[in-house]
Image (cartoon, rainbow, N blue to C red):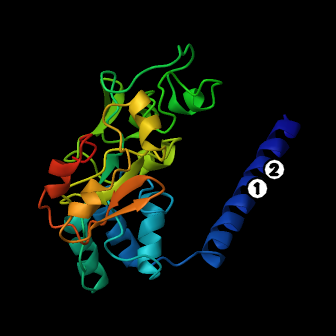
Amino acid sequence: MNLILAAAIFTACVGIFVGIFLGVAGIAFKVETDEREEKVLAALPGNNCGGCGYPGCSGLASAIVKGEAPVNACPVGGAEVGEKVAAIMGKAAGENVRMCAFVACAGDCEKASDISDYSGPTDCRMMNVAPAGGPKGCREGCLGGGTCVSVCPFDAIHIVNGIALVDKDACKACGKCVAACPRHLISLVPYDAKHFVKCSSHSKGPEVMKVCQVGCIGCSLCAKNCPKDAIVFENNLARIDQEKCVGCGICVQKCPKKAII
């Protein structure tokens, strides 16, 4: 009986000692936090998508308060959240250009030919490293495996007729699909941009026409007819400078393969 009582007293003493030690340690090593950080975190959408380049919303809130990130750095919240955070920080929100994802490939099941059979996981990363590189003849086109779909937290991208298509209104420009695409076909573009080259092939014209009906063949008719010199060619592929483009649509009319949308 005495042993049990002694053990109980000893345990109680240890508990009291540990409690006092942790209490003192908590006070001694307490990290002071800026109250603005909590307010900024509350203003952020809480998706923790990482599209801002920081580890979740808490990481971005900390960076904003420290002055390491702009107040409008959250791509999901957009201008509305940027203004709220700016008010908390006592700064101007600045211009916030809405962005959305764009898939530079139009080679769906009807327009792009298959040259092999693929039997394996329907994941673009796996298909891309397969011996045949997936079934499609174009080795720079969309594989249609849906890796981008699986990583999108906003249900803004889907596989339609063999290629990925983005719902620009649902897209929050978090960039997860951009990072996931093994062929780097997806980029973030201005939401209000008018025209795009929906192709990523750098192959020469005759090679493109063998495998795709709507691929860029490098004829340069779009560039020659653009009144604003907004189109340049890089390694057989047309590229539109969105800052120069005025949306006249001449390039769409002149493109013989309808690779510009």
Image: 86 above or below 160: below
Q: Is residue 57 left or right of residue 171?
A: right
Alpha-carbon neighbours of circle 1 within 10 Å: few (<14), some, or many (≥20)?
Answer: few
Q: Which residue is located at x 82 percent, y 37 percent?
A: 4
Task: Check whether the beta carbons of the residues at disc 2 and disc 1 lie within 8 A of each other.
Answer: yes
Residue beneath label 1, please?
A: 13
Q: Is residue 125 visible?
A: yes
Q: Is residue 76 visible?
A: no
Q: What is the number of the mark on residue 10?
A: 2
Q: Which residue is located at x 20 percent, y 59 percent?
A: 193
x and y, in percent, of residue 1 in the image:
84, 34
- Identify which residue, 148 or 41, lies in the foreground: 148
> Furthest-left residue in view?
248
Q: Secondary structure beneath disc 2?
A: helix
- Identify which residue, 232 or 74, lies in the foreground: 232
x and y, in percent, of residue 14 in the image:
77, 55
Image: 117 above or below 34: above
Alpha-carbon neighbours of circle 2 within 10 Å: few (<14), some, or many (≥20)?
Answer: few
Image: 89 above or below 20: below
Which amino acid type corresponds to the residue marked 1 in the rendered image? Answer: Cys
x and y, in percent, of residue 149 in the image:
39, 34
Q: Which residue is located at x 38 percent, y 69 percent?
A: 38
Q: Secondary structure beneath disc 1?
A: helix
Which amino acid type corresponds to the residue marked 2 in the rendered image? Answer: Phe
Disc 2 to disc 1, C-alpha distance: 5 Å
x and y, in percent, of residue 85 in the image:
28, 73
